[in-house]
Each structure stands twice: as structure tokens, then as C-alpha cells.
Amino acid sequence: MLDFAACGMRFSGPRKAIYEWLIAHPVHPTADTIYQALRPTMPTLSRTTVYNVLHTLVDRGLAQRVQTEDGEARFDGEVRPHAHFKCERCGRVVDIPMAELPNPDVPKGYHVARTVLVYRGFCAECAAAAEQGT
């Protein structure tokens, strides 16, 4: 269980629910996906609350914002360094473990704060379906 106070956050029911859903469902959801999932059990939850909590979690280093080049913001509860793969057919985004992230030659005086690496292609299911012509 996350210690909200140790992370500089006040505890609230929505914060707890959003964080726990994000961790339990490593599907790289959008804020709206989380909102739709939690809304039936939390009828007073607003989309704004979901967005605000997610951005706070990202600011505190408890989640990552995964920005794919199509502009869609997704969120990831896995904060250890890793890459992502987005299927161009079904839209699924999965984690790709990396023993070592690329170490580019950056200009002198620059400091890399984070690396975002997104592979694009077809997941195994979509690749198989394409081969079968479906």
C-alpha cells in the first residue's frame, strides 16, 4: 500500500482508488479508461479528479505518462526504466523490459532527465490475424 504522506500527498479515497487501479491494471490506460472503470463504484468521481490525481502521481514519480506519437496520453504505474511497444492495429501498449536504456551522445552541458522509447508495430495477435487475412 502506498504511503501517501511519505510521498507528500494527502490521503483521499479517489487517490487511493485511482492509484490501486493503475497498479492492478498494467494496460497503460488513458485517464478516461480509469474514470469509466471506477465510476460505477464511485458515482461522485469526476474526470477532472482522475486527471488531477494522475498528474500528481506523475509529478511525485509514482507513475509515468506514456506519450505515443499519436498524441494520446496514457499512464503507467511501472516507474522503473523500460520501453513501450504500441500495436498499430489494436492500440495495445505493453512494457518492454530493458537491461540498459540507450545512452545517446548528448551535447555538452545537456542533462538527460528521462528517456522515452516507444516501439510501434503489430502485437503477436494482430500479426497472426494479418497473416490469416482477418
Image (cartoon, grey):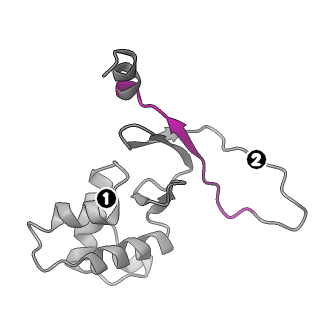
Residue at image position (41%, 59%) is: 74
Q: Position of residue 6 (x, y in %)?
A: 41, 77
Residue at image position (43%, 82%) is: 8
Q: Position of residue 127 (x, y in %)?
A: 41, 24
If the image is split into quadrants, where does the N terminus sit? bottom left
Query: Which residue is the extreme one toward the bottom?
Result: 10
Q: Is residue 20 left or right of residue 59?
A: left
Give the residue type that dot 2 points to: Asn
The residue segment tinted magenta is 112-125
- Would you say residue 124 sits in the magenta stretch? yes
- Considering only order in the chain, which callout, 2 or 1, is on the residue closer to the N terminus? 1
Question: Dot 2: what SS?
Answer: loop
According to the picture, the residue beneath numbered tag 1 turns out to be 22
Residue at image position (50%, 67%) is: 61
Q: Position of residue 52 (x, y in %)?
A: 36, 79
Q: Viewer-proximal residue, 100 or 122? A: 122
Q: Count neighbours of disc 1 (C-alpha within 10 A) and say few if under 14, some if 14 to 19, many if 20 or more.
A: many
According to the picture, the residue beneath numbered tag 2 turns out to be 103
Q: Indicate the quadrant where residue 133 lies.
A: top left
Q: Viewer-proximal residue, 98 or 128? A: 128
Residue at image position (18%, 77%) is: 45
Q: Are marks 1 and 2 in contact (CB under 8 Å)?
A: no
Q: Is residue 10 above or below residue 34?
A: below
Q: Count neighbours of disc 2 (C-alpha within 10 A) and say few if under 14, some if 14 to 19, many if 20 or more.
A: few
Q: Is residue 127 above or below residue 111?
A: above
